[in-house]
Image: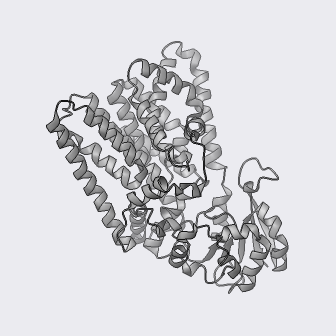
């Protein structure tokens, strides 16, 4: 409990330090959905029209919001920051699980403490674990499940006793509920464990049956939850698998090279830990203790199958690689410890500087703009009305304001799901309709706007029921639509820096806020 308490305090500090945006799913696939469930307003993205997301994930925040509402504590700050504070608990549990799996696998208290230090001071853990991603929940569940697997394989517990398999199977099944893509990984882990029961066919069958029963119950319950909130039966794991792998439609989010996870994402997550990771790999493979290396590599290979890859998807794999880094660091510190203090200080200093830059500065304007909207008071309307001309989902939305106002952004949903998105969010569109020629063009609103920015904005403003009080755009877009804005009595109120170093042609580094005079 002492270790968990220390980790929890540290993760709460990380959450309170964060003032930047990372990937849109942090806000749009969890808190925004939960806000709509509890308070009755919020935006649902096209994935919810396609049945690609389970309601189990946003219900974590929904329960938190409902509790705040009952107590009358649903302030804007707690609604916005609450999911990160909640994730601090999951992150601390992840930290303890990494510590325990290192201890039970290596049976070395010193090494497990070094692993905990690496876990806490890794910049990407500090930056990502407390954010409200399903991947962060998956990392927590995976770390604990792998701890149970390690305890099963390395302790005196009878591996043939089905009862000793219950815990890891439950957490593996929950991991699949939150991230259906992890199903292939856990199938491989299950095959490995079953292979350890050679010559014991009865016990092997019992373990397989137990896994099927528990998996069916857990995933079946999640399907019942989805049936309740979707209003129809949706088998989300299958929808997810079909969409991303069988139909290979994940490239709608962008394509990456097949090796991006190994050549870009893993080095970025490890950063100054890379030398210790390499040392740890050599030492553990030589000692025939490469299970974490194999498991982490398997996870990365499986997540390399879809065309679309993101660094945050690998946060569960990072938990498996931290003990490897710890093994390398322990070897490095085995002799002449005093002379190596400067090197260790540099290694961890780099990690903390990365966290401070990305956690405090990089993409901070995407959060800051919502503070300005929250504080703005309209002179023309009863409440402020906002039009976002940034790429869709660039900023948080209602869950960051906790205030029911008219807001509009340019939709970028795939063609086949566009009508469903318009239907479930139709109230957001009435006050500021999109030009008819854009609607029938076959392009998304965002795509059509990028081709005809000035004409599209002019048509929208001319047909608006109410002119927006605020228009938010990146600076490169502002240069193209400035004549239209000035013609309609808009003035540039503020420029927000979105990164520490601003370059003239780097549009993502400046956000403009235009105000109706």
Vertical comparison of 325 with 265: above or below: above
Residue 92 image point, x, y percent = 42, 44
Quarter of the figure that contains the C terminus: bottom right
Query: Hey, which quadrant is residue 415 in on the image?
Result: bottom right
Q: Residue furthest top?
A: 336
Residue at 21% x, 47% y: name it. Answer: 210
The quarter of the image holding the N terminus is top left
Q: Residue 270's x, y, as percent?
A: 55, 34
Q: Quadrant of residue 367?
A: bottom right
Which of the 4 quarters of the picture holds residue 394? Answer: bottom right
Q: Residue furthest left?
A: 202
Front-most of residues 204 and 146 = 204
Observer able to see residue 163: no
Q: Nearer the viewer, residue 443 or 3?
A: 443
Of residue 319 and residue 220, the one placed in the foreground of this image is: 220
Q: Is residue 154 above or below residue 417?
A: above
Q: How is the image coloured?
A: one colour
Q: Where in the figure is residue 289, as x and y percent of width and height?
A: 38, 24
| Looking at the image, residue 382 lies above or below residue 217 | below
Q: Tell me which residue sits at (20%, 32%) in the image.
A: 157
Q: Is residue 186 left or right of residue 465?
A: left
x, y percent for residue 185: 39, 43
Residue under the image location 42 percent in, 31 percent down? 294
Q: How many marks?
A: 0
Residue 20 in sight: yes
Question: Horizontal placement of 54 versus 356: left or right?
Answer: left
Q: Is residue 506 left or right of residue 347?
A: right
At horizontal 63% and vertical 49% (from top left) the residue drawn is 360
């Amino acid at each position: 409990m002492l270790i968990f308490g220390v980790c929890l305090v540290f993760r709460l500090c990380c959450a309170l330090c964060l003032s930047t945006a990372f990937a849109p799913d942090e806000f749009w696939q969890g808190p925004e959905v939960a806000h709509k469930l509890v308070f009755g307003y919020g935006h649902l993205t096209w994935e919810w029209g396609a049945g690609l997301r389970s309601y189990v994930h946003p219900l974590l925040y929904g329960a938190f919001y409902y509790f705040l509402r009952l107590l009358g504590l649903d302030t804007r700050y707690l609604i916005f920051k609450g999911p990160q504070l909640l994730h601090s608990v999951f992150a601390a549990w992840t930290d303890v699980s990494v510590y325990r799996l290192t201890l039970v696998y290596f049976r070395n208290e010193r090494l497990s403490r070094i692993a905990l230090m690496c876990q806490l001071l890794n910049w990407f853990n500090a930056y990502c674990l407390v954010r409200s991603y399903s991947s962060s929940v998956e990392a927590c569940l995976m770390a604990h499940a792998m701890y149970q697997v390690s305890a099963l394989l390395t302790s005196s517990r009878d591996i043939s006793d089905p009862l000793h398999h219950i815990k890891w199977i439950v957490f593996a099944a929950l991991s699949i509920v939150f991230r259906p893509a992890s199903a292939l990984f856990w199938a491989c882990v299950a095959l490995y464990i079953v292979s350890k029961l050679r010559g014991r066919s009865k016990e092997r069958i019992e373990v397989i049956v137990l896994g099927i029963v528990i998996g069916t119950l857990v995933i079946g319950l999640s399907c019942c939850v989805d049936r309740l909130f979707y209003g129809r039966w949706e088998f989300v794991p299958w929808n997810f698998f079909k969409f991303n792998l069988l139909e290979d439609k994940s490239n709608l989010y962008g394509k990456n090279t097949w090796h991006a996870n190994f050549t870009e994402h893993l080095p970025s997550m490890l950063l100054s830990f890379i030398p210790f990771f390499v040392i740890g790999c050599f030492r553990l493979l030589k000692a025939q203790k490469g299970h974490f290396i194999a498991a982490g590599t398997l996870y990365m290979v499986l997540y390399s199958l879809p065309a679309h890859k993101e660094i945050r998807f690998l946060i569960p794999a990072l938990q498996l690689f931290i003990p490897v880094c710890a093994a390398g660091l322990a070897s490095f510190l085995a002799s002449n410890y005093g002379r190596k203090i400067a090197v260790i200080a540099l290694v961890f200093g780099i990690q903390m500087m990365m966290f401070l830059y990305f956690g405090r500065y990089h993409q901070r304007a995407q959060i800051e703009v919502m503070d300005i909207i929250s504080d703005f008071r309209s002179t023309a309307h009863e409440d402020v009305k906002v039009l976002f001309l940034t790429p869709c989902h660039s900023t948080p939305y209602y869950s960051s304001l906790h205030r029911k106002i008219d807001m509009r952004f340019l939709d970028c949903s795939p063609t086949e799901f566009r009508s469903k998105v318009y239907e479930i969010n139709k109230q957001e569109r009435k006050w500021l309709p999109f030009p008819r020629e854009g609607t029938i063009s076959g392009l998304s609103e965002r795509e059509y706007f990028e081709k005809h920015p000035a004409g599209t904005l002019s048509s929208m403003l001319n047909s608006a029921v109410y002119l927006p009080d605020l228009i938010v755009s990146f600076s490169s877009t502002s240069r193209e639509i400035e004549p239209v804005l000035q013609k309609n009595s808009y003035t540039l109120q503020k420029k927000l820096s979105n990164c520490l170093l601003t370059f003239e042609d780097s549009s993502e580094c400046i956000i403009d806020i235009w105000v109706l005079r």
